[in-house]
Amino acid sequence: LNTQNAEFVLSAARLADCPRDSLPQIAFAGRSNVGKSSVINRLLNRKNFARVGSAPGKTTHINYFRIDRKVYFVDLPGYGYAKVSKQERARWGRLIEQWFADASLLTLGILLVDLRHKPTADDCVMAQWFKDSGKPFVVVANKQDKIKKSEWEPNLARIRETLALDAQTPVISFSAEKGLGKEELLGVILDHISA
Ligand code: GDP
């Protein structure tokens, strides 16, 4: 997969706008500020492709990027931002619910969490959505560079336990800042698009 060849396709505000062709769709989900844009940029070796540090939770759009004309990276809107209005939260819920209800839109889910913290209730809800989709998903524990090495293993175990992951679901330590975990995550993605 030539990750240099990445293009922004569209920003979908409604389910009807989501592309549904034969390309596999890799969906990224996570709390606002977890580093979702940074992880996507890291995978693509870009600085400002997916927008980093844009007003958190401001958008309820699903952004589609096409990589090498072979696969979509689907940037699901971040959740859990405290200052979002009730209305916007409801819009988010409706869009995500509809999106998950359409099985053709998901090939592999990528749930981003923060390696420093115990996953939030929202993270658990999102994990459940991925589980219920019946599609494979992987958890990416970002911001590894922010904690001591001695905390890596216990924190990974806490993530696995809190999200009640089964043995088949990988948890990948990641640092969008340092690039750690990039090859492992790309490997998982490749496994699911060439299958
Ligand atoms: P998003 O809201 O989930 O898309 O998060 P962003 O990608 O905008 O990142 C939120 C903030 O966390 C930014 O200031 C990033 O520079 C920072 N950040 C993201 N990933 C990492 C990481 O792995 N390590 C560190 N130290 N900072 C990170």
Image (tube, rainbow, N blue to C red):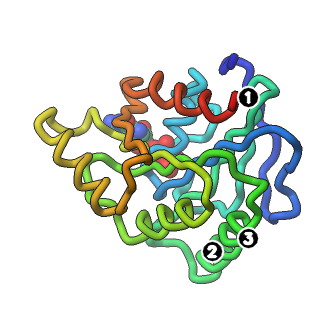
The crowding category of the residue bearing disc 3, from other C-alpha atoms within 10 Å (few below 14, some 14 to 19, many at least 20), is: few
- Examine the rendering and report whether any part of residue 53 can be seen: no
Q: Quadrant of the C terminus?
A: top right
Q: Mark 1 near mark 2, Cβ–Cβ under 8 Å?
A: no
Q: Amino acid at mark 2?
A: Gly
- Examine the rendering and report whether any part of residue 63 can be seen: yes
Horizontal side of 144 relative to 61 (left or right) equals left
Residue depicted at x 74% and y 59%: 103
Q: Sequence order check: which comes first, mark 1 or mark 2?
A: 1
Q: Mark 3 near mark 1, Cβ–Cβ under 8 Å?
A: no
Horizontal side of 50 relative to 22 (left or right) equals left
Horizontal side of 46 relative to 81 (left or right) equals right
Q: Is mark 2 within 8 Å of ligand 1?
A: no
Q: Secondary structure at mark 3?
A: helix
The crowding category of the residue bearing disc 2, from other C-alpha atoms within 10 Å (few below 14, some 14 to 19, many at least 20), is: some
Q: Mark 3 near mark 2, Cβ–Cβ under 8 Å?
A: no
Q: Sequence order check: which comes first, mark 3 or mark 1?
A: 1
Q: Quadrant of ligand 1?
A: top left
What is the CA distance from the residue labelled 3 to the residue labelled 1? 24 Å
Horizontal side of 162 relative to 165 (left or right) equals left
Can you identify the residue that label 1 sits on? 67
What is the CA distance from the residue labelled 3 to the residue labelled 2? 8 Å
Q: Residue furthest bottom?
A: 86
171 vs 166: above or below: above
Residue depicted at x 48% and y 45%: 138
Label at residue 98:
3
Q: Sequence order check: which comes first, mark 3 or mark 2?
A: 2
Label at residue 26:
none
Can you identify the residue that label 2 sits on? 93
Q: Amino acid at mark 1?
A: Ile
